[in-house]
């Protein structure tokens, strides 16, 4: 998809640092969690954050395994 804005990355990294165990590598599972733990009103921004978290979790699993 290209370069993500810094606010997407910083918010996603903050969520991963605070609540990383709750998130998975599934975009669909992450969407309600992002809504629950942030006050993001925009559906597009929520989806970008959830997608970035899913991507980060997938790459972490590949590096570990």
Image: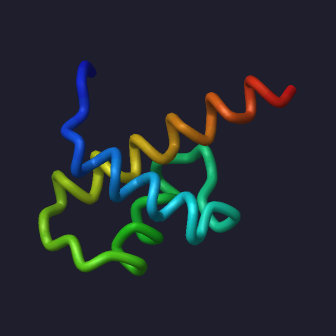
- At horizontal 39% and vertical 43% (from top left) the residue drawn is 51
**Quarter location, residue 56:** top right
Q: Residue furthest top?
A: 2
Instruction: Tell me: 4 left or right of 58.
Output: left
Q: How many marks?
A: 0
- At horizontal 28% and vertical 46% (from top left) the residue drawn is 48
- At horizontal 39% and vertical 67% (from top left) the residue drawn is 34
**Quarter location, residue 45:** bottom left
* Residue nearer the viewer, 27 or 53: 53
Instruction: Tell me: 58 left or right of 64.
Output: left
* Residue nearer the viewer, 57 or 9: 9
Task: Judge whether 30 appears above or below 34 on screen.
Answer: above
Task: Judge whether 59 appears above or below 57 on screen.
Answer: above
**Quarter location, residue 2:** top left
Its colouring scheme is rainbow
State the quadrant of the N terminus.
top left
Task: Judge whether 62 appears above or below 46 on screen.
Answer: above
Image position, residue 26 (x, y; %): 56, 46
Image position, residue 54 (x, y; %): 51, 43
- At horizontal 48% and vertical 47% (from top left) the residue drawn is 53
Instruction: Tell me: 5 left or right of 15.
Output: left
Instruction: Tell me: 4 left or right of 59.
Output: left
Q: Residue furthest right?
A: 65
Image position, residue 59 (x, y; %): 62, 28
State the quadrant of the C terminus.
top right
């Amino acid at each position: 998809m290209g370069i993500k804005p810094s606010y997407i990355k910083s918010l996603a990294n903050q969520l991963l640092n605070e609540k990383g165990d709750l998130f998975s590598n599934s975009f669909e599972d992450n969407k309600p969690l992002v809504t629950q733990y942030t006050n993001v009103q925009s559906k597009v921004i929520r989806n970008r954050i959830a997608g970035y978290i899913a991507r980060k979790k997938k790459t972490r699993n590949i590096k570990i395994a």
